[in-house]
Amino acid sequence: MTDTPTRHDQHGRYPRAETTDDFRHNLDVVHARIAAACRRAGRDPAGVRLLPVSKTIDEARIRHAYAAGCRFLGENKVQEAHHKWEAMQDLGDLRWSVIGHLQTNKAKLVARFASEFQALDSLRLAETLDRRLQLEGRTLDVFVQVNTSEEASKYGLAPDDVAAFIRELPGFPALRVRGLMTLALFSDDTERVRACFVRLRGLRDRLRQDAPDGIGLDELSMGMSGDFEIAIEEGATVVRVGQAIFGARAVPDSHYWPGGNS
Ligand SMILES: *Cc1c(COP(=O)(O)O)cnc(C)c1O
């Protein structure tokens, strides 16, 4: 299993999905890749959730993705996500996961509409989200973002800081802690990418042993279009996949996180 390649080099080659049938096809391909990775790792594909990432995608194409079966979408930027949520209120069972870095002053937007937030990385943000959620009478599933690649991204907690951070989270009852999230090193060096995923799983396994009551650490959100098979081999329970479903993005990754491909 150590020879599974990254596919970052194919980012320019994912076909653009325009129709519901295109989305059905691309989703089938991704589900087949997930199933193959699960077979290699001796895992049940039911233990891996595919989160389609619809950032930069317009409403018309998102409606086709919905028609093809997508009911839970990931967005990196909260304002874009909130705008889409408002525009597609008629799709009552469409839910939104915010997966990108969040400034505290935008926490109230997330509290208003998101079902999940995957980039929790500060107590100040946890406190603001919790307060806003209580005002809205809502709860939010959250993932703690960990910086497993150190040099490639400034977002996320350093692995050594996660244990102390998790100990504080029971103080925020509107946050339902589900697990950890990471972005691997963005590289064609498979073993260095895999090392990021191994680090996140190892950290989760250690923390789970004495996690506070009510703090769930079952989930590992890791892997995207270029590296999700490797993430699955290393234990991912959520993969966040944009380009392999929607088509190659023109906006460079450096727009979303420091150190991304430009
Ligand atoms: C865009 C994004 C993804 C998906 O990346 P693709 O290359 O489109 O699969 C995953 N995670 C985060 C945090 C993202 O912003």
Image: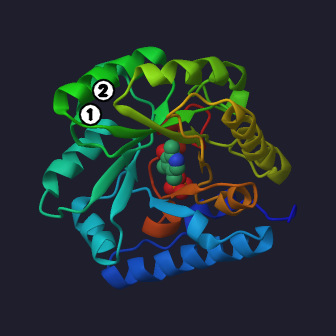
Task: Check disc 1 and report its element: helix, strand or loop.
Answer: helix
Judge from the rendering whether residue 162 lies leftward or rightward of residue 75; answer left or right: right
Residues under numbered marks 1 and 2 in contact, where contact means CB atoms less than 8 Å apart:
yes
Write down the quadrant of residue 234 in the picture: bottom right
Counting other residues with Cα less than 10 Å from the Cα at mark 1, is it few (<14), some (14-19), or many (20 or more)?
many
Question: At 29% across and 19% down in the image, what residue appears?
Answer: 105
Question: At 61% across and 24% down in the image, what residue appears?
Answer: 157
Judge from the rendering whether residue 165 lies leftward or rightward of residue 242; answer left or right: right
Question: How far apart are the two marked residues, 1 and 2, measured between alpha carbons?
Answer: 6 Å
Looking at the picture, which amino acid does disc 1 mark?
A: Ala
Residue under label 2: 107
Residue under label 1: 111
The location of residue 54, given as percent across then percent down, is: 38, 56
The location of residue 59, given as percent across then percent down, is: 23, 61
The location of residue 13, given as percent across then percent down, is: 57, 69
Q: Looking at the picture, tell me which residue is in the foreground, 157 or 243.
A: 157
Here the colouring is rainbow
Is the residue 1 above or below the residue 68 in the image? above
Which residue sits furthest right? Answer: 2
Write down the quadrant of residue 5 in the picture: bottom right
Quarter occupied by the N terminus: bottom right
Residue 252 appears in view: no
Task: Check disc 2 and report its element: helix, strand or loop.
Answer: helix
Counting other residues with Cα less than 10 Å from the Cα at mark 2, is it few (<14), some (14-19), or many (20 or more)?
many
Looking at the picture, which amino acid does disc 2 mark?
A: Ala
The location of residue 123, given as percent across then percent down, is: 46, 16
